[in-house]
């Protein structure tokens, strides 16, 4: 396991990831930071920032699903999306645990 430090909404988060996944997780963090910034949620609580980012990402997924049938999505992409969803859920669990301990 490796650790990656992400900067999201001006706050730093260290998350664990599998060895070799550091760059990918870092890229995902950059995407989440862009969503937080676009929502104007920087400076909010950690939970609120992640909520805004999750809502915007969920909206994008919803829009994409409306344009494509599930059969049109390659299996490899479906696997990557499922993997990303697990990572986002793990990050949310981590943030909820941090908020509860604060």
Image: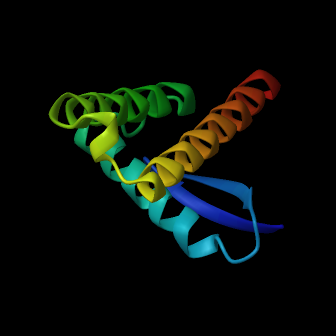
Residue 64 shows in the view: yes
Q: How is the image coloured?
A: rainbow
Q: Residue furthest left?
A: 67
* Image coordinates for residue 68, horizontal then vertical, percent: 21, 37
* Image coordinates for residue 32, horizontal then vertical, percent: 41, 48
Q: Residue at x 42, y 31 (%)?
A: 54
Number of numbered discs visible in the structure rendering: 0
* Image coordinates for residue 65, horizontal then vertical, percent: 26, 32
Q: Quadrant of the C terminus?
A: top right
Residue 47 occupies quadrant? top right
Residue 12 to residue 69: above or below: below
Residue 99 to residue 25: above or below: above
Q: Residue at x 57, y 40 (%)?
A: 88
Left or right? Give the position of 4 relative to 26: right
Left or right? Give the position of 75 relative to 25: left
Residue 44 shows in the view: no
Residue 58 occupies quadrant? top left
Q: Residue furthest front?
A: 71
Q: Quadrant of the N terminus?
A: bottom right
* Image coordinates for residue 14, horizontal then vertical, percent: 69, 57
Q: Residue at x 73, y 61 (%)?
A: 17
Q: Nearer the viewer, residue 90 or 10?
A: 90
Left or right? Give the position of 47 relative to 2: left
Residue 69 to residue 80: above or below: above
Q: Residue at x 75, y 33 (%)?
A: 98
């Amino acid at each position: 396991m490796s650790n990656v430090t992400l900067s999201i909404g001006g706050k730093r988060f260290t998350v664990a990831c599998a060895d070799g996944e550091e760059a990918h997780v870092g890229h995902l963090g950059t995407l989440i930071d862009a969503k937080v910034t676009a929502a104007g949620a920087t400076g909010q609580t950690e939970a609120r920032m992640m909520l805004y980012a999750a809502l915007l990402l969920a909206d994008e997924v919803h829009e994409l699903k409306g344009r494509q049938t599930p059969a049109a999505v390659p299996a490899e992409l479906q696997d990557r999306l499922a993997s990303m969803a697990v990572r986002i859920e793990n990050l949310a669990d981590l943030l909820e645990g941090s908020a509860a301990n604060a």
